[in-house]
Image: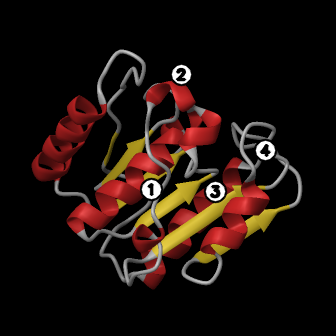
Amino acid sequence: MIIFYHGYNSSNQTNKFTELNAQEKFCRSVNYDESSYEEIYHLYCKDIEEHKPEMLVGHSLGGYWAIKMANEYNLPVVLVNPSFFPEESLPHLNYANIEPMLIQNNIPKYFYLELGDEVLDLEKLNEYVKDYSYVETVSDGHHRVQYINNYIQVIEFAINTCMIDYTME
């Protein structure tokens, strides 16, 4: 089971989720503007406890939540153009930036970054995480992910290196 966290102003209809060819996957649609941090946190805890995923995947603001929940539940995580500095990119949400301790640990972390992202400073993020994680980058692309197949390959690599007993379709 893979739980996917979508980005800001997105849903479980995003191609990052729909094109994920996992046999078992789940994504809850969340309106980040209409739900408090605490409400979202409790929903995501409930989802993990109910679905018992082997891995979390998150894109953009969903990457923010994926790294937080991966640390909370000690789960491997794949992060796709994640928003780790929401104080800069989404200040109205009042989310704190991701603390270094959430990166500098032994939880398996895999990043896929399209450095042409027009929304987030992924060069800054790459410097922040590269010493503690597997990072795959492309020099172009965009925020919504131009190279879906590359992103899927990072998930497959994560599954194989974490030795998760999981089958992609």
Amino acid at pointer 1: Glu
**In the rendered image, which residue does mark 3 sit on?**
151
Q: CA distance from mark 1 to mark 2?
A: 28 Å
Q: Nearer the viewer, mark 4 or mark 3?
A: 4
Which residue is tagged 2? 9
CA gap between label 2 and label 4 equals 16 Å
Q: First in sequence: mark 2 or mark 4? A: 2
Alpha carbons under labels 4 and 3: distance apart: 14 Å
Regarding residue 21, the answer to whether it shows in the image is no
How far is disc 1 from disc 3 in space, using C-alphas?
16 Å
Viewer-side label of 1, 3 = 3
Along the viewing direction, whichever of 104 and 48 lies nearer the viewer:
104
What separation in Å lies between label 1 and label 4 (alpha carbons)?
Answer: 29 Å
| Label disc, if present, on residue 169 of the rendered structure | 1
- Residue linked to disc 4: 117
The residue lying at 71 percent from left, 44 percent from top is: 120
Q: Earlier in the sequence, mark 1 or mark 3?
A: 3
The earlier-in-sequence mark between 2 and 3 is 2
Label 2 vs label 3: CA separation?
A: 20 Å
Residue 100 visible? The answer is yes
Quarter in which the C terminus is drawn: bottom left
Task: Give, as a three-letter code, the residue at label 2.
Answer: Asn
